[in-house]
Image: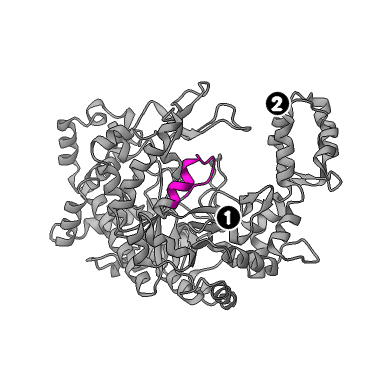
Amino acid sequence: MAHEYFLHTKTSERWKKIGTKKRAGVTVPLFSLYSRKSVGIGEIPDLKLLVDWCKKTGMTIIQLLPLNDVGSDFAPYNSVSSFAIDPMYLSIENLSHIDVTEYTGELERMKRKYRPRFKKVNYNIKKAKLELLWRIYKSNRTDNIAEFRDFSASNNYWLNDYSMFKVISEKTGSTNWQDWDEGIKNRNDEAIEEIETGNFERINFYSWLQWQLSLQMKEVKQYAAVSGVLTMGDLPFLVSRESADVWAHQNYFLLNLSSGAPPDMYFAMGQKWGMPPYNWENIAIDKFIYLREKLLYAENFYDMFRIDHFVGLFRLWVSLAGDLNTPGGYMPKEEYMWESHGRAIIEVMAHTTAMLPCAEDLGTVPGCSNHVLYEYGIPGIDFQRYYKKNFFFRHPAEYRVNSSAVISTHDSSFWPNWWKFEAGTIDEKLFEIMCMNAGMDKKHYKYVKAVLFSKEASRYGRLMWNDNIRTPEMLKSILQIQNEKVNDIVYAYLDSYDEKGKFLTYLEYFPAELGVNPDLVYKILERINQTDSIFSIQLLQEYLFLEKDFLESGSKWNYRLNTPGSVTRDNWSLILPVSLERLLELEINDSIRSLVSDTGRSL
């Protein structure tokens, strides 16, 4: 059996623990879930109901988007701590060592006030919860709880710094620690001692919250284990510049630089995400304790962990912070150093924790990435709509054994939306830039655009190729470009023209109509589960689309979890169209269980 190779890799002990049989699972952000008991947002105990659904449908992996405490943009990949869990996910009803009976009425009022509307999270719930939790904390003693004292002591590496960061942010009204008073900003001993002495109770409150969150998370992991379900945590690769981590460990970050992405057809100077890159040299001098502590803490809650932006371990695109005009570059600069640089970090990740590492290896992938993943037995991601060879979709048997096969990601459209609005198209702005870069004047561009693309079928910034543009030669004759830059346009054409036809060939399914319907969704899910990939982990919505009503309501252009490159309230706020209790009763559950079983992914 091909998957037995995992038992001979550098993560063999982890594979012996979980087994090498193919598995199916779901990816969810906790903020998307809700139950009858949750108050305003998905809460940690709600995950038990999701475990029950997994058991019912044959799923054995729950992959969670990051649960880290977030800032004002509520973006899970731009957290204010890479350790702390966001208190908004805490279930007040399930607090440990606390009798919350007297708050029952208030919790019910909060449920009504912050109930999901328009299928979006009302993030005001976080402030409301913190205010109530503070009152509860003030009314109860914590100094006599041995478990809490033990938790604080065992997590001293990060907990006190985080709690102080939260308190100072409250007092100053800003998380931008670089604007704080010099003594606090530079962590002068006297200034820190003064903060601790004058704000002991509030600092202790934030530590108490993390203890309560850890208890609820541990309980979910134990509950899942009984049902044979593995939990996977998503550990953000980077952390916000305005975070407790950066304030507490300034020497671990290159604060004059900004992480990002290399130049492409959209961004001539590359992208700047704002998060500072790591100073791996200083982290290594301290024997990677910062990385080790993060992994050991996450191990309390997860059986597996996802290495976000895995390719960034080898080399990361960086540019000067605050400078939009200066070109950036990779760090390390020398390509021959990339593999050894990444290996040093991966070695720590692979051997510090009992969790199985998994990798997000999408984007511009360096040559060393694939064979390092294979050597370590770390699954990457094979993304169905982009996993092609010679412009055709790869057969399921061509998927990497060490991969998780996915239909969509949190940064992409869901599959029905891709099919309706993106398949067979090219981005309008990208096409314009390619034409301008190739030397085409604006008048000819308007003509070319009108001839090449269907006006009726092109929408939302996507250009649909006209059916009669059947060959690259026809394309070139219309473009009338003689330089080598025409190759970019030809490549985009070959990759996207007749994409739906190519996809149906990949499915070996030829329906009379090309519209989206539950039968087509079933074929997609069946095909992705037939791949050789050890894991098939899909966003939960992709399975819900088997239900006709959910499919119709979710097949809108803007129905998605996140739109990269934008900062709006629509990002990171989408709620499932069904409660967890209702999820357990859906008729499609039997079909999902059969699909998982028939494709050999049920244990």
Q: Where is residue 505 in the image (x, y as percent from the top left)?
A: 73, 60
Q: Which of marks 1 and 2 is nearer the N terminus?
A: 1
Q: Residue furthest top?
A: 326
Residue 188 visible in the shown view: yes
Q: Marks 1 and 2, how far apart in space? A: 31 Å
Q: Is mark 2 on a helix, strand or loop?
A: helix
Question: Which residue in the structure is indicated by mark 2?
Answer: 437
Vertical arrangement, residue 446 with respect to residue 127, above or below: above
State the image coordinates of residue 202 (x, y, percent, origin top left).
Answer: 23, 47
Q: Do the residues labelled 1 and 2 touch (CB within 8 Å)?
A: no
Name the amino acid, label 1.
Ser
Mark 2: few/some/many CA within 10 Å (<14, 14-19, 20+): few
Residue 437: quarter of image? top right
- Amino acid bearing label 2: Asn
Instruction: Magenta stretch: give its range.
Output: 360-374
Between residue 237 and residue 78, name the one nearer to us.
237
Q: Is residue 367 magenta?
A: yes
With respect to residue 578, does 273 lie above or below? above
Q: Which residue is drawn at 35% across and 71% down?
A: 225
Mark number, residue 66: none
Depth check: 288 or 51 in front?
A: 288
Q: Which mark is residue 408?
A: 1
Which residue is rendered at x = 15% and y = 40% of the image? 197
Task: Note whether 592 is above or below 15 in the view shown.
Answer: below
Answer whether residue 76 is visible to the viewer in this image. Answer: no
Instruction: Answer above or below: position of 539 versus 325.
Output: below
Instruction: Report if residue 335 lies within the magenta region.
Output: no
Q: Which residue is drawn at 56% across and 58% down?
A: 119
